[in-house]
């Protein structure tokens, strides 16, 4: 299933969400036009084996890696989810807290993934963990919102308005299931997807978002 839009407008201009989307696109353009894309990724991605918690320089990629992407489909899908779900969360918790929340969820997601692949030399990149945190917050704060969704049935697209809690819990279960499967087969990713980071970011966002809300939310 693929979300098209949510049916509840936040009523507030999502300046930080738009800045995050714009910055991700800007970094992706820098990545594409880098003289040596492999060197660019190696410099800013999170390579677990290089992490040394006594050397702050090796910890910076926990932040910088979340603004890199592996291709057009990767960044388009990430930015689409952020566009749909981020504005409501930003409106609920406030602009500055939303920015801090986004980065915190991204770092937490990468750290959870790192715990299972600490000796890996493969680069970790992408905003998926941070965006998963936004999805977790959306589930916590707006579970009864409706999300217009495309569901392929027998190869044909059907448009259905689903409760946010149904779609997001389904999404989380898939990530968690694949994350557990990846542990069983002794790899923390399946097909190059960091499912543990997704699940970890989602749980982080779900657990901490409510404490950040500055006003009573309608249901």
Image (cartoon, grey):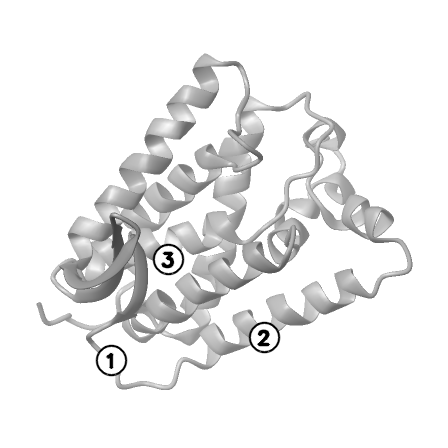
Is the residue 59 above or below the residue 134 in the image?
Answer: above
Which residue is label 1 attached to? Answer: 9
Please state if 172 lies on the left or on the right of 161 as rendered: right
What number is the disc on residue 22?
Answer: 2
Badge 2: how crowded within 10 Å, few (<14), some, or many (20+)? few
Q: CA distance from mark 1 to mark 2?
A: 20 Å
Badge 3: how crowded within 10 Å, few (<14), some, or many (20+)? many
Is residue 210 something one can see in this rendering?
A: no
The earlier-in-sequence mark between 1 and 2 is: 1
The earlier-in-sequence mark between 3 and 1 is: 1
Q: Position of residue 102 (x, y in %)?
A: 46, 59
Residue at the extreme left: 219
Identified at 64% across, 55% down, the residue is 71
Is the residue 45 above or below the residue 90 in the image?
Answer: above
Please state if 97 lies on the left or on the right of 148 as rendered: right
Which residue is label 3 attached to? Answer: 134
Which image quarter holds the C terminus? bottom left
The earlier-in-sequence mark between 2 and 3 is: 2
Q: Position of residue 156 (x, y in %)?
A: 27, 56
């Amino acid at each position: 299933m693929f979300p098209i839009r949510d049916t509840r407008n936040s009523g507030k201009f999502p300046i930080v969400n738009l800045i995050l989307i714009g910055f991700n696109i800007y970094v992706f353009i820098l990545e594409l036009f880098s003289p040596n894309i492999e060197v660019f990724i190696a410099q800013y991605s999170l390579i677990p084996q290089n992490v040394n918690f006594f050397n702050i320089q090796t910890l910076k990629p926990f932040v910088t890696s979340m603004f890199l992407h592996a291709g057009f489909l990767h960044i388009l899908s990430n930015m689409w989810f952020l566009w749909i779900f981020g504005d409501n969360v930003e409106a609920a918790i406030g602009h500055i807290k939303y920015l801090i929340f986004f980065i915190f969820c991204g770092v937490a997601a990468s750290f959870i993934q790192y715990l299972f692949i600490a000796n890996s030399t493969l680069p970790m990149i992408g905003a998926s963990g941070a965006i998963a945190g936004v999805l977790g917050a959306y589930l916590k704060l707006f579970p009864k919102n409706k999300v217009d969704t495309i569901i392929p049935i027998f190869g044909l697209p059907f448009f259905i308005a689903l409760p946010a809690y149904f779609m997001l819990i389904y999404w989380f279960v898939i990530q968690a299931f694949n994350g557990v499967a990846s542990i069983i087969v002794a790899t923390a990713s399946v097909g190059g997807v960091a499912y543990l980071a997704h699940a970890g970011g989602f749980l982080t966002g779900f657990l901490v978002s409510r404490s950040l809300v500055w006003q009573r939310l309608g249901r």
